[in-house]
Amino acid sequence: MASYPGITTLPVNLRRDRPEVNSPIFKTLNPNTEVEISHAIVGEQYLDSNIWYVLRNQAFVWSKAITTTSEVPFVKKELLVTADDIGIVDEIDVGALIALREGWINSIAVLVNRPNDPDSSYLKAFCQKLKNHQVNPQQSLYDNTHIGLHFTITSGGPISSHEAVGSLVDGDNKFLDFRKFNRNFEKEDYVAQVKTEFFAQYQLFKEIFEREPDHLTSHHDVLTFNRHLFEFVQAWSREHRIPLRNHRYLPGSKRFWYDTLALMNVDLPSIEKMNDWEERQGPFDFDGSQRTIVDHYGPIPPFGINCYDTIIANKQLALDKWMRDFLVSTDKRREIVIHLMKSGLRNQSDFVRQYRWLRSSYPGIEIKYFDGRVAEYLSLQKRCHWNSDRCLGLLPRV
């Protein structure tokens, strides 16, 4: 990584966590101290400047306290904040809609195979709500929200006929659990059926939202489970110029779980293999989300939440750590994936009881994590809005 020499012109504090004057002090430098600068970013306005330098030691320093003869590169930081799994559970969608209106998020990933909704009237009504809410005189939520297709072959049932995708479903015409993914999905007929269902969901998305998806993701990341599916979606993404969530940055804990526990019957490709397959496809020729980083907003409690305050605090700590890592990097854009739900329920057992119907009508969304979704919603609600952050901006929809 390139660095640019600078010299302090007055006593100055290096800040540890954020480019702000109240961030903890990492070190105090005397005048005429040499420093190595990585890049410049927007931070807190102090006196007549809001430009801060990120040093090679990953500390932040107010730029007007440094003189340099080099042209330090400025990195504008933008976030794509995506709420996952929209379209199936009303309370999840209500949480996402509120978050969009309040400016906490700017992106949603939509499942289009809602059960018992043959004409997609529910999602069409959801889309209309986005159109009806004006952000400003020129734009509605529909205009400035990134609306992506969350393709699934592991939750709910197919859009295609049972005959067209019979190998992907069980006797109740529901998709197989993702843990039943196996080497059969590398066979030509299985891949053909996945493509059939993909195109059906893609066409239905366009019918509902009256535009192309702003990005493409897959439930349980199934499009990274073998070479045939990976190369298919990579080629499709390039052809349609639709950003694709980057496989390189699947959360490490999720990847470990897939590798060691969940997918014992799959020869799951390594990140290095997928990198090689992607490179053979050639570079993307559009500026999309291909180089964004994906992470989850804090830990997911697997055994139920006993204290929401503790979980929310842990999520805030995880987010602050993630944000700092983004700021000290030279990445221009990143994505953070969140799971929201607005509900009056709090106990995991209450969620399991109230949403038991999901197990038969739409298997593939885990009910026992719904309390974690509520904690995620409450955590975002408590946090300052992204678009008022001094350092970051929500990624605008072009």
Image (tube, rainbow, N blue to C red):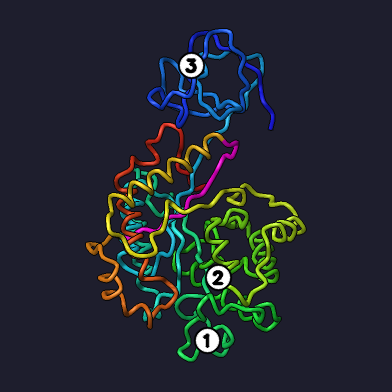
**Image quarter for residue 33?**
top right
Q: Residue at x 52, y 14 (%)?
A: 29
Residue 20 appears at what percent x and percent y? Answer: 42, 26
Q: Which residue is mark 3?
A: 28
Residue 352 appears at what percent x and percent y? Answer: 30, 73
Amino acid type, residue under disc 1 in the picture: Ser
Label 3–label 2 contact, CB within 8 A: no
Q: Say whether disc 1 or disc 2 marks the residue closer to the N-terminus.
A: 1
Residue 268 appears at what percent x and percent y? Answer: 65, 68
Q: Which mark is residue 261?
A: 2
Q: CA gap, disc 3 to disc 1? A: 67 Å
- Asked whether 243 or 228 is in front, the reply is 228
Label 3–label 1 contact, CB within 8 A: no
Left or right side of 29 for 192: right
Q: CA gap, disc 1 to disc 2? A: 32 Å
Amino acid type, residue under disc 3 in the picture: Thr
Residue 277 falls within the magenta-colored stretch: no
In the rendered view, tell whether residue 325 sits above or below residue 35.
Answer: below
